[in-house]
Image (cartoon, helix red, strand yellow):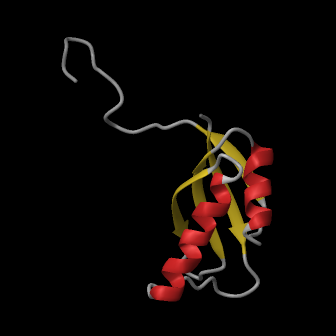
Amino acid sequence: MPRYLIERRYAVDVQIPVDEPGAHARHSVTENNLLEGVTWLHSYVSPDKRRSFCVYDGPSPEAIRRAASRNKLPVHEITEVLVLDPYSYKQKGGIP
């Protein structure tokens, strides 16, 4: 499944409460995403809370946009990405 980085920009600070209504909102997003075959993995929010960068798995950018529309979330940029981390490579000589 392809992985995508989605940039969202907000006119006001994005607020996601860590209480029961916030949990309900996140659950609703997850359920709506499933209708498009999209999985929200995690997000990063800028210090000014005006942008978020969300990591999703999904079949296509179009599916990501449809899921965002269902969730009434903006989408400004979608970039397909590959995972790169310091643990994914083996060095010569058998040292992982």
Residue drawn 53% across the image and 87% down it: 21
Nearest the eye: 37 or 41: 37
Residue 38 location (% of width, % of height): 64, 49
Q: Position of residue 75 (x, y in %)?
A: 77, 62
Residue toward you, 11 or 40: 40
Point out residue 8 in the picture as x, y percentages from the top left corner.
70, 67
Is 40 situated above or below 47?
A: above
Whether residue 35 appears in this view of the structure is yes
**Where residue 34 sits in the image (x, y, percent)?**
63, 53
The residue depicted at 63 percent of the width and 51 percent of the height is 5
Q: Residue furthest top?
A: 93
Q: Quadrant of residue 14?
A: bottom right
Drawn side of residue 78 relative to residue 44, left or right: right
Q: Would residue 23 be found to the left or right of residue 32 on screen?
A: left
Quarter holding the C terminus is: top left
From where the camera sits, is residue 17 visible?
Answer: no
> Residue at point 72% right, 69% down?
71
Count numbered badges in the picture.
0
Q: Is residue 21 above or below residue 28?
A: below
Q: Residue at 73% of width from left, 78% of height from top?
A: 10
Which of the pair 54/19 is nearer the observer?
A: 19
Is the N terminus in the top left, top right, bottom left or bottom right quadrant? top right
